[in-house]
Image (cartoon, grey):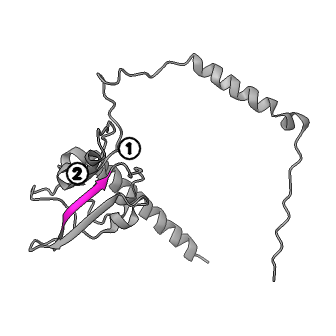
Amino acid sequence: MQVKNPTIKRTKLTFLERLYLPEILKGMAYTFVQMFRPKFTSEYPEVKWKPPGSFRGRPVLVEREDKTGERCVACGLCARACPPMAISLQANETDLPQERYPITFEINMLRCIYCGYCEEVCPEEAIVMSDEYDLNYTSRSEAILDKEKLLVPMERVKARLEFLREYKHAVRKADAQYVGEEAKP
């Protein structure tokens, strides 16, 4: 049985709206006003921009507080969540309380699209998007970052970790509120 498409009610446009002239003039007026506003130009190589905690830069692995290695437990969620499949890792067992660790952990930065899905699914906050934005590589092999190149101390990504904790708390609070409203009769 074929379902009919619902009818679409079109709104009647006035003559001026059909010409799009008012909208074009609004856009030109906005551009004209912006020409006289102060410029925010920085002298880039000499003056570096300090991004906020919400900025998604190069993904890095976070080192443990006791400096004995990475926080990663090699669950592989980041590799599965990565849309361009830029992350690859191999796990191994250990006697430490974390039970597993990655033998190899690589991110192909030529594939990475900086979406942040890897850090969202990580249960240990082991992979985080840092504030590094000035990335350049002279060869393809240089762009494949291994565990040693990715490992950074927790102090370097502290602002991002705090932002993630606040963000996740806000999302959980909103979800709980939504579920509570849905349950009301």
Where in the figure is residue 94, as x and y percent of width and height?
A: 11, 73
Where in the figure is residue 108, as x and y percent of width and height?
A: 32, 53
**Quadrant into which the N terminus falls:** bottom right
Residue extending farthest to the top is 36
Residue 2 highlighted magenta (yes or no)? no
Q: Which mark is residue 86?
A: none
Residue position for label 2: 150
Q: Which mark is residue 55?
A: 1
Left or right of 145 on screen, residue 19: right
Residue at the spot 32% in from the left edge and 36% down from the top edge: 134
Is 126 located above or below residue 3 in the figure?
Answer: above
Is 184 located above or below residue 66 in the figure?
Answer: below
Q: CA distance from mark 2 to mark 1?
A: 18 Å
Other residues around mark 2 within 10 Å, as few (<14) / some (14–19) / many (≥20): some
Q: Amino acid at mark 2?
A: Leu
Depth check, mark 2 against mark 1: the one in front is 2
Residue 107 highlighted magenta (yes or no)? yes
Of helix, strand and loop, which mostly describes the magenta segment?
strand
Residue at the spot 38% in from the left edge and 22% down from the top edge: 42
> In the image shown, does 86 or 1 lie closer to the viewer?
86
Where in the figure is residue 83, as x and y percent of width and height?
A: 43, 60
Residue at the spot 83% in from the left edge and 67% down from the top edge: 6
Q: Secondary structure at mark 1?
A: loop
Q: Give, as a single range, the part of the protein colored magenta.
A: 102-108
